[in-house]
Image (tube, rainbow, N blue to C red):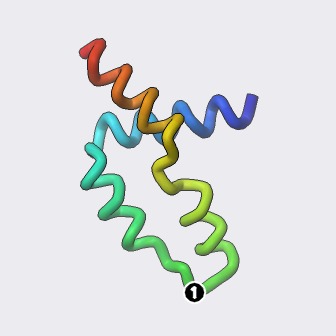
Amino acid sequence: MIACVSFGFKAALLVNMGTEGYQERLNGVETSTTLGKFNMWTLQADPISLFVADFINQLR
C-alpha cells in the first residue's frame, strides 16, 4: 500500500513539474546527512513513476 502511494505521489509530482523540473528540485536536496541521502534515494524518478506519469499525461 505504501509503495503504491509513493509511486502515485512521485508520478503526480512528475506530471505537475515535468521531468526536468522534478530532477532540478531533486538536485537541490541536501545530501550531506543520512536523511538527505535517504530522501534522494526514495524520491528519484524510477521506471514505475515515469510510466504512471506518462499514462496520466496521455489522459490529459
In the rendered image of this protein, does residue 18 appear above or below residue 29? Answer: above
Query: In which quadrant of the rendered view does residue 55 lie?
Result: top left
User: Of 36 and 54, which appears nearest the observer?
Assistant: 54
In the rendered image of this protein, does residue 10 appear above or below residue 34? Answer: above
Residue visible at 27% across and 17% down in the picture: 58
In the rendered image of this protein, does residue 22 appear above or below residue 52? Answer: below
- The amino acid on which the numbered mark 1 sits, given as a three-letter code, is Ser
- The x and y percentages for residue 43 are 53, 54
Report how many numbered discs are placed on residues in the image: 1
Residue visible at 34% across and 53% down in the picture: 22
Query: Image quadrant for the N terminus?
Result: top right
Q: Which residue is mark 1?
A: 32
Q: Secondary structure at mark 1?
A: loop
Q: Residues within 10 Å of mark 1 (few under 14, many from 20)?
A: few
Residue visible at 59% across and 74% down in the picture: 36
Tell which residue pokes out farthest to the bottom in this image.
Answer: 32
- The x and y percentages for residue 30 are 50, 78
Residue visible at 50% across and 56% down in the picture: 44
- The x and y percentages for residue 5 are 63, 32
Tell which residue pokes out farthest to the top in this image.
Answer: 59
